[in-house]
Image (spheres, rainbow, N blue to C red):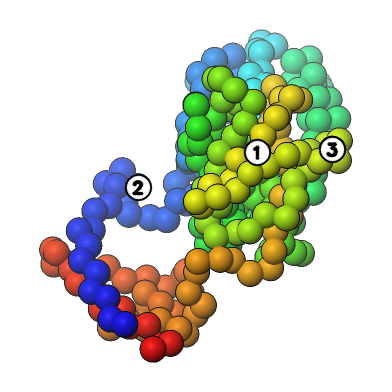
Amino acid sequence: MTVVVRAFVQTNGSQGGRPLGRHGGGAARPGRRRRAPRRRARRPGRPLASDPPGSWWYDGKDRPVTTGLNVDRYIANAGNSVRSLMDFTAMVDGKFPPQQEKFIDLMKDYLPPFWESLHDVDGGGFMYGGMQPGAWNDGAYGYVTVSRAHPDTTQYVHVTTRPTTGDQVKIRDNGHRVKGITDLRTGQKIPFDQHDGTLTIRSIQDWDPYDTVFKVETTSHRQGVYPTGTVTADDPALTDGDFTTYTDNKGKLPVSFTLVDCRG
């Protein structure tokens, strides 16, 4: 079977056409009340909670730390394969301002119950497999992380913004067939439905104010995906199974590619 694909290529000028996850957002600052920018990871090495408005150092004031904003960015970094550097600004005596200490203490106790979903994982939905992150149903938003130890069978769904109505989240499954879902913090089994390319996590009762995390176990083989080598193209980068190679339109619009199913 031969298929001719015609595509009109367009890039986001502000991103320079770069892959998702390489463009850094602004730093979170104590006292700032705006929401975290979505879909954009932050540059490694920029502070999460330490820089007061207008400066990168302690300015003599015990400024408030916006907990939800900073936790959200920490989760966003993990979901975009970006490392986080927790940087804080000490006072002249070496101690941290009280409100920064409060945030540090919160994170010390907050992260361990779902640490496995943040440590030794890759961002899901793109280069490393996994279901589709981003905007979901009814205003819900979140990220997906994929276990490096078990990339074919274990991934994590992070719901950082719960839906405005209802008790379920609908996620594009990207061909992953789900076997079971648990609340990562409690181990409780969570009911789900899956059909037509969508996973619905149902009957969610325990919403975390910052990140509700589900551990998703899947079969080892994706469905509806052509294995590498079963399809060829006139541009090999389209079908080589390597996400680090790419093709473009070479300055021409429209552009055509011919795909051939080698299975007959």
Specify the amino acid type for callout 2.
Answer: Gln
* Residue position marked by numbered label 2 in the rendering: 15
Percent position of residue 147, x then y: 72, 58
In the rendered structure, the answer to whether residue 46 lies left or right of residue 178 reads left
| Vertical placement of residue 43 versus 120, above or below | above
Nearest to N terminus: mark 2 or mark 1: 2
* Residue position marked by numbered label 1 in the rendering: 201
Quarter of the figure that contains the C terminus: bottom left
Q: Neighbour class for label 3 at 10 Å: few (<14), some, many (≥20)?
A: few
How far apart are the alpha carbons under marks 1 and 3? 13 Å
Percent position of residue 119, x then y: 75, 51
Q: Mark 1 falls on what kind of element?
A: strand
How far apart are the alpha carbons under marks 3 and 2? 40 Å
* Residue position marked by numbered label 3 in the rendering: 188
Q: Mark 3 falls on what kind of element?
A: loop
Is residue 104 visible in the rendered image? The answer is no
In the rendered structure, the answer to whether residue 195 lies left or right of residue 250 reads right
Percent position of residue 89, x then y: 69, 27
